[in-house]
Image: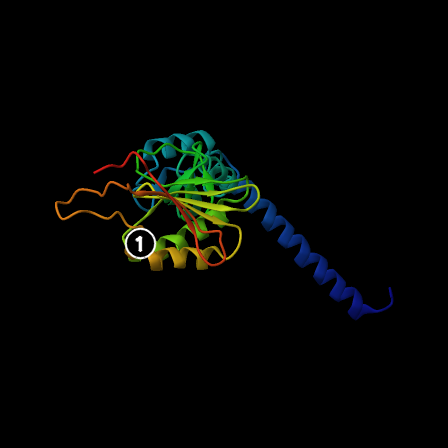
Amino acid sequence: MWDNAILLRNLANALLVFSMCAVLYGMAYYVTHLPGLFPLHSVRLSAAPQRVDAKKVLQVARKEIQGNFFTVDIERLRGALETLPWVRNVSIRREFPDGLGVQLEEHQALARWNDTALVNRQGEVFYATSEQMLPGFIGQDGGSAEVARQYEQFSQQLAALNLQVARIALSPRHAWQLLLSNGMVLELGREDVQQRLARFVEVYPYSLAIQKTASGRQKAEGAVAYVDLRYRNGFSVRRNANERG
């Protein structure tokens, strides 16, 4: 090996190139980490948030940003911003020479979850306060996505009757119950829930809707308060005795 001039020359050249790269890397690392160079001067929100407090975003940025344009820990800043109420996701990019661009994805509330939290349109539970009129979801931990999917399907079916779901409950035994916007409760059970609701939609206008007299007053037998659709070939009905003409 030591008698091979060509091999030794190639090895020397490789070592020289490696040494030069190491020196250049060390110089670049040193320069970019100098505290006085490349300071960050701005944090720009790509769009004005609807729910998130922009002042709180800037407060978090001031607290979490350390280092300069090249050394700032973007993952740390992203994690801190995603703890703010109504923030679902955060994207951050460097904007040369001295800024950061922040894009916030906000939660879109779909319903209230177990009266303690909210559910977004992706079926994810999050914690925030809202004055919106929202339907209620009742379910077990980890079941919010399934309840959100069923809510969308049930809502589409009930739209033909101009009715909405005011509350949807999924029991630990996986049985479904709906409270409608007219106060009626539907028991759907665990199986064939779409088919059972379709049967309700089909018969509702003819036999279950509140019947009114010619004067516009409800008939004395009262409105339907509860419908049990868990029967194979029919359903049972309970009327509200307090609804009188």
Q: Residue at x 59, y 50 (%)?
A: 24
Q: Name which quarter of the figure residue 245 lies in.
A: top left
Q: How many marks?
A: 1
Label 1: how many Cα within 10 Å (few below 14, some 14–19, many 20+): few
Q: Position of residue 59 (x, y in %)?
A: 38, 30
Q: Find the residue positioned furthest to the left.
A: 215
For residue 167, side relative to residue 222 (left or right): right
Which of the pair 146/23 is nearer the observer?
A: 146
Residue at position x 53%, y 39% in the image: 33
Helix, strand or loop at disc 1?
Answer: helix
**Residue that badge 1 annotates:** 207
At 44% from the left edge and 29% from the top edge, which residue is drawn?
63
Residue 155 image point, x, y percent:
36, 53
14, above or below 150, in the image: below
Which quarter of the figure is the N terminus placed in?
bottom right
Please state which of residues 65 and 26 is positioned toward the viewer in this rendering: 65
The image shows residue 177, relative to residue 19, as above or below, that is: above
Q: In this rendering, does residue 45 appear at all?
A: yes
Q: Amino acid at mark 1?
A: Ser
Image coords of residue 38 (percent x, y): 44, 40
